[in-house]
Image (cartoon, helix red, strand yellow):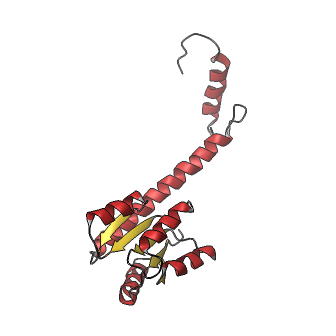
Amino acid sequence: MTKRTILIIEDDESVRTYLLRFLASRGFNVEAVGTGEAAFARLAAGYSPNAILLDLGLPGMSGHDVLARLKSQATAIPAIILSGMGEISSVVAAMKMGASDYLVKPFEEVELELALENALEKQNLKNEIKHLQQKLDQTDDGDDSFFTNPKMQRIKEVAKQVADADVPVLI
């Protein structure tokens, strides 16, 4: 299994260093930047993390601006907000903008681990649904590739034969 990657966008160097060490000790590949602009430069260079930890109080481009830009670019990367403010309006605004979770500093390590696991699991489920939908869309009436079991293919053939009949059929 490939290591999951996390991009930390945090202007406080001590918090950034702590998160780098903590997440690396938990088996993540971690990169960290201090500004939203630096984060978008990394993303534009082809870096594609599995999740983003985003501080709201960034210099220049604020965390809200970063989150809005991520979501406007249809980026499917889950973003977990880290903030020193626990104001309800800030939490609601971030969640409405598409944040996966919102942690108020200082947070417990277990809270961060749980938020990351939940965000990554949700993303994996979305990816699996997308993959299955694509597979289903590729399957047309003449293609039995969706059914790999020969017995299921035979049932599909029988169902096609009786589909136009107005009679009950027990499969």
49, 79: nearer the viewer? 79
Do we see residue 53 in this rendering? yes
Do we see residue 76 in this rendering? no
Farthest residue, direction right: 142
Residue visible at 46% across and 64% down?
78
98, 93: nearer the viewer? 93
Q: Position of residue 142 (x, y in %)?
A: 73, 32
Would you identify the image quadrant in which residue 22 lies?
bottom left
Q: Position of residue 82 (x, y in %)?
A: 35, 73
Q: Compared with residue 97, is residue 82 higher up or lower down, i.e. above or below?
A: below
Would you identify the image quadrant in which residue 136 lies?
top right
Q: Is residue 164 left or right of residue 94?
A: right
Q: Is residue 167 left or right of residue 116?
A: right
Q: Is residue 6 left or right of residue 94?
A: right
On the rendered image, what quadrant is the C terminus found in? top right
Q: Position of residue 119 (x, y in %)?
A: 41, 62
Q: Position of residue 17 (x, y in %)?
A: 40, 87
Tally the numbered discs.
0
Residue visible at 45% across and 78% down?
9
Residue visible at 58% across and 78% down?
42
Q: Compared with residue 126, is residue 39 higher up or lower down, i.e. above or below?
A: below
Residue visible at 55% across and 15% down?
169
135, 44: nearer the viewer? 44
Q: Compared with residue 58, is residue 72 higher up or lower down, i.e. above or below?
A: above
